[in-house]
Image: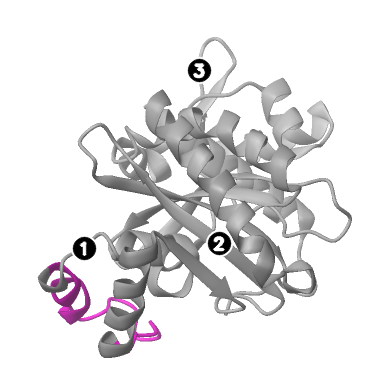
Amino acid sequence: MKNPPPYGVTSVDHALHLAVILQVEGPLTVSEAARRIGVARSSAHRLLSTLVYRDFAVQDEDRSYRVGPVLEIAAQAQSNVSALRAAALGPLRTLVDTLDETANLIIRTGRTVRFIASVECAQALRVGNREGMVFPAHQVTGGLIMLAALTDDELDALYTTAPTNPAEERPDLEKLRAELDAIRRTGIALNLERSERGLVAVGRRVTDARGDTVAAVSVSMPSVRYEPEGVQGIVAALATAAERIHAAL
């Protein structure tokens, strides 16, 4: 279960957010950086300068910033992520307008998932921006959706490899298979405070032109606003968003 630190350092959070944007989306200017994270241009300039100093970013001749040596190798593996995110932003904003809850786009890499786009709703009590965050795939809605796209043999192969992190939590495969079977039947995944206390999420898959699952789109809300009878409307809105993302790809 991942919870925000009680005494988070805002400047560190902003710097990490900018690093994620550079890696996932590509170059940006100081003005664009300031707008994206909601700070003054002078603050954005200081943050980007620090990323340059630590080799997380490089400044080009046109004064825009792009990923530096630290992130460059990983960025090369993200060639399709930028297009996927661009295709999803419009549908995610429409999803937020429709449901007034935070919407996300998630991709899977091995046993983990990353939130590559997140659009917050305007409600005072809301699930915050998840962009750039990484979770174990079996703990979150989007991860379960994408694991459900695997065969039993692929799932076994995925989880039989020894973890690189000794602290990695391994799922109960028998229980996980039963959950994934249910997701295959219904086409949706429901997270009831599984990844974070006080959070509920509903998600469904996004497919490419070949019909392969390439991402998951989800809606996250505080558990106090979750009503089981409202799931049908959420699922319908998610289906529309997934279809629009598919069409844009």
Image-based side of 150 in relation to 231, left or right: left
The front one of 33 and 221 is: 221
Task: Report the span colored magenta.
Answer: 154-172
Residue 144 visible in image: yes
Residue at the (59%, 64%) spot, across then down: 201
The answer to whether the residue labelled 2 contacts the one labelled 1, judged by CB atoms less than 8 Å apart, is: no
Q: What residue is shown with label 3?
A: 60
> Does label 2 or label 1 sit earlier along the sequence?
1
Q: Amino acid at mark 2?
A: Val
Q: Secondary structure at mark 3?
A: loop
Q: Quadrant of residue 168?
A: bottom left
Image-based side of 82 in relation to 218, left or right: left
Camera-nearest label, 3 or 2: 2
Residue at the (31%, 64%) spot, across then down: 184
Residue 168 among magenta residues: yes
Dot label at residue 202: 2
Q: Secondary structure at mark 2?
A: strand
The front one of 237 and 22 is: 237
Dot label at residue 150: 1
Q: Secondary structure at mark 1?
A: loop
As measured in the structure, the alpha-carbon distance from the residue carrying label 3 to the one carrying label 2 is: 41 Å
The front one of 200 and 166 is: 200
Residue 219 position, x and y percent, is 61, 55
Q: Amino acid at mark 3?
A: Asp
What is the chief secondary structure element of the magenta stretch? loop
Q: Amino acid at mark 1?
A: Leu
> Does label 3 or label 2 sit earlier along the sequence?
3
